[in-house]
Image (tube, helix red, strand yellow):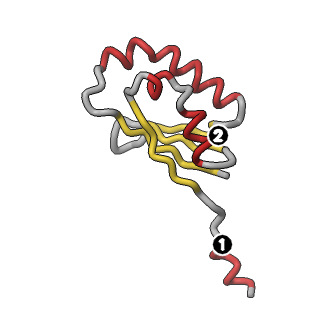
Amino acid sequence: MKILAIEKEIKNAAPEEFTKHAKEEAKVLWDLYSSGFVREFYFRADEDSAVLVLEAYSASIASDKLNELPFVRKKLIKFELVPLKPYPGFERLFE
């Protein structure tokens, strides 16, 4: 299942904490990408936050995997998870 993960920064998160844990965050994100869990990652053009495209059996499993990220563990960010399914609309064209 594809899952869209939209980053939300926790209010009052100290900017120096992001700097302190940035290298470890990048390492863990790379590991999740290399394993196939994170399929794509972006920064939003309209605000300073990340959007990840994940591959997991469920949103619950995706949430557990995202908890491996240092920024999540340190309660600097959280993710809104949006499970996706294939678009079925083209079927109407071929009935």
The quarter in which the C terminus is drawn is: bottom right
| 18 sits left or right of 14 in the view | right
Splitting the image into 4 quarters, where does residue 66 fall? top right
Q: Which residue is mark 2?
A: 39
How far across and down, in percent of the image, does residue 37 sit?
66, 37
Q: Residues under labels 1 and 2: Cα distance?
A: 22 Å
Q: Position of residue 31 (x, y in %)?
A: 65, 24
The residue at 63%/61% (across/down) is: 85
What is the quadrant of residue 26 in the picture?
top right
Q: Secondary structure at mark 2?
A: strand
Badge 1 amino acid = Pro
Residue 63 numbered tag:
none
Residue 15, percent from left and from top: 30, 20
Q: Nearer the viewer, residue 27 or 63?
A: 63
Residue at the image point whose x is 50% and y is 14% from the top: 23
Residue tagged 1 = 88
Residue occupying the point 58% across, 45% down: 60
Q: Are marks 1 and 2 in contact (CB under 8 Å)?
A: no
Label 2 CA crowd tier, 10 Å (few <14, some 14–19, many 20+):
some
Q: Residue at x 51, y 21 (%)?
A: 25
Q: Is residue 94 above or below residue 34?
A: below
Front residue of 95 and 77: 77
